[in-house]
Image (spheres, rainbow, N blue to C red):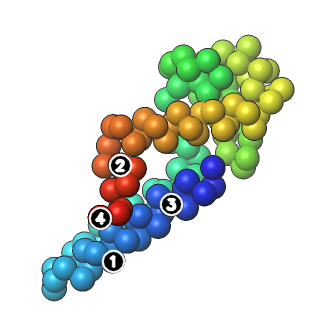
């Protein structure tokens, strides 16, 4: 899963470079690019975009029901899911990451193949 994140970061860098070459107005763009990179960095650690339980897919998740895995805090909707997750964290993490990548690919500006032309 680290690979996918690296690809996203690389795509962001490419976009940033592309804008920088576009013209003299590039300095204004730089200010926009840097906070975005910080947010990506934080997302890796704290996963602020997690809105559903990685085990059963239910929402909302609860702030006081969480487990630490892969250096991050993962939140759940009920205690049952926390125990299930702790039995096999890597499996649920992988499935959840996959689902998130698919959602991001469909929903927003991050599209598969958008970097190639
Ligand atoms: Zn759940």
Q: Earlier in the sequence, mark 3 or mark 4?
A: 3
Examine the rendered structure and indicate whether residue 82 appears above or below residue 1.
Answer: above
The secondary structure type at the circle numbered 2 is loop
Q: Earlier in the sequence, mark 4 or mark 1?
A: 1
Q: Determine whether label 2 and label 4 are within 8 Å by CB.
A: no
Residue 8 appears at what percent x and percent y?
A: 47, 58
Residue 81 appears at what percent x and percent y?
A: 70, 18
Q: Can residue 47 be seen here?
A: yes
For disc 2, the marked residue is 111
For image coordinates 73% across by 33% down, the residue present is: 91
| Spatial CA span between label 3 and label 2 | 12 Å
Please name which of the two marks, 1 or 3, marks the residue nearer to the observer. Answer: 3
The secondary structure type at the circle numbered 1 is helix
| Spatial CA span between label 1 and label 2 | 18 Å
Please name which of the two marks, 4 or 1, marks the residue nearer to the observer. Answer: 4
Examine the rendered structure and indicate whether residue 93 appears above or below residue 116.
Answer: above
Q: Residues within 10 Å of mark 3 (few under 14, many from 20)?
A: few
Looking at this view, name the residue that lies furthest to the right. 87
For disc 3, the marked residue is 7
Please name which of the two marks, 2 or 4, marks the residue nearer to the observer. Answer: 4
Q: Determine whether label 3 and label 2 are within 8 Å by CB.
A: no
Looking at this view, name the residue that lies furthest to the left. 24
For disc 1, the marked residue is 17
Tally of marks: 4
Q: Earlier in the sequence, mark 2 or mark 4?
A: 2
């Amino acid at each position: 899963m680290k690979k996918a994140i690296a690809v996203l970061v690389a795509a962001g860098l490419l976009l940033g470079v592309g804008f920088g070459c576009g013209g003299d107005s590039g300095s204004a763009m730089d200010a926009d690019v840097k906070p975005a990179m910080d947010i990506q960095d934080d997302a890796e650690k704290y996963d602020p975009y997690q809105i559903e339980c990685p085990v059963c897919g239910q929402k909302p998740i609860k702030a006081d029901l969480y487990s630490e895995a892969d250096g991050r805090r993962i939140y759940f909707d009920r205690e049952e899911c926390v125990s299930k997750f702790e039995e096999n964290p890597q499996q649920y993490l992988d499935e959840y990451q996959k689902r998130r990548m698919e959602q991001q690919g469909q929903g927003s500006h991050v599209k598969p193949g958008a970097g190639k032309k």
